[in-house]
Amino acid sequence: MKTYKIALIKGDGIGPEVINEAIKVLNKVSELEGFNIEYKEYLMGGCAYDLYKNPLPEETINGCLEVNAILFGAIGGNKWDNLPREMRPESGLLRLRKALEVFGNIRPAMVFEELTKASTLKAEIITNTDLIVVRELIGGIYFGQPKGKDSDRAYNTMIYTKEEITRIAKLAFDLASTRRKKVCSVDKANVLEVSQLWREVVTQVSKQYPEVELTHQYVDNASMQLIKDPKQFDVILTENLFGDILSDEAAMLTGSIGLLPSASIGGKVSLYEPIHGSAPDIAGMGIANPIAAILSAAMMLKYSFKENQAAENIHQAIVKVLKKGYRTKDIALFDAKNICNTSQMGDLIVKYLKEEI
Ligand code: NAD
């Protein structure tokens, strides 16, 4: 029987709550589809700082480099907000992504038909939205040198090389080739030199993909178009900072940040995580939506292990549970029939992995 080794980083806040549900689902789907999963848990984030005075201990980096994939919850929280920047949980995550060399962040935003009412946008605008944001993850202004801050002046640097743009562009075009064959590259080429290079290189790469249509949008326009007509997008390709913002905006099309998974790929070991943070406002209350974490586990099965049937079964089980009217609190705002807590939602998805409705 095939065995996949996974590093689990549950993290802080609701991280452990949602990852525990993803584990339940992985255990059941692996049993049904006939493969094994071995888990090893590592500390990272605020919980690691509390124990080791380091948000990303060496043991965690080394452990992550030895497995087939990493499933990650969320890190951070008010308790650690006043630490020096390098000690903060978020710095640990940036360092982990860099150590893994995962340059491509894939964030799908698909609207579940059953949840169109949970979105703040009109149903006719969002129905059938199915887009993917491909965000460059280990370059740009989050990592550029020099950077600095004193009492009356601060600066960061946005840098991209041709090589960095080429590899993320190829990833986006490869993905679009398997979908509706459209890439919209988002930049700010009317103002930023780095965006001008971005546009030149993306245009160059597109010549290797004649079957894929390439369009360009400025980031301010793209943020507006996402709300106005999200169905126009198939794959959105963009750099680190713009992608961070646009993907959260895209998340809200679906109704809740608690629904959306992500994959960080292209490096030594791929990392899968819900796009939400540690949600300190609801941590410990048992009301977090585990669907984003469960869909992240499904992305792991598909992208890292090629267990496409298992991934599809998870997706279908979620659809069945939503069709039955079960909702966690975040998606029950306009449509409350059967409200369930985090653990009940995980149990229901497990149940519908094997049951028809
Ligand atoms: P957040 O995503 O944690 O929460 C934003 C809002 O969405 C909150 O109201 C929260 O209750 C809600 N929410 C988030 N996930 C939910 C879920 N699964 N179910 C139901 N509701 C959910 O963002 P924030 O409040 O800006 O950040 C909180 C902490 O998380 C900060 O320390 C931040 O740095 C950190 N953070 C971590 C990551 C990560 O680990 N990748 C990502 C973003 C933010």
Image: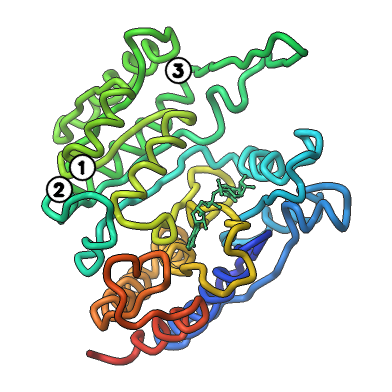
Left or right of 135 on screen, residue 124: left
Label of residue 354 in the image: none
Q: Residue at x 48, y 31 (%)?
A: 240
Q: Which residue is mark 1?
A: 230
Left or right of 33 on screen, residue 236: left
* Quarter residue 142 falls in: top right
Q: Secondary structure at mark 2?
A: helix
Q: Which residue is mark 2?
A: 125
Q: Residue at x 26, y 24 (%)?
A: 221
Instruction: Determine contact: label 1, label 3, CB under 8 Å.
Output: no
Q: Is residue 345 above or below residue 237?
A: below
Is any part of residue 128 visible from this angle? Answer: no
Q: Is disc 3 surrounded by few (<14), some (14 to 19) or many (20+) residues within 10 Å? A: few
Q: Is disc 2 surrounded by few (<14), some (14 to 19) or many (20+) residues within 10 Å? A: some
Left or right of 290 on screen, residue 253: left
Instruction: Determine contact: label 1, label 2, CB under 8 Å.
Output: yes
Residue type of the residue flagged with mark 2: Ile
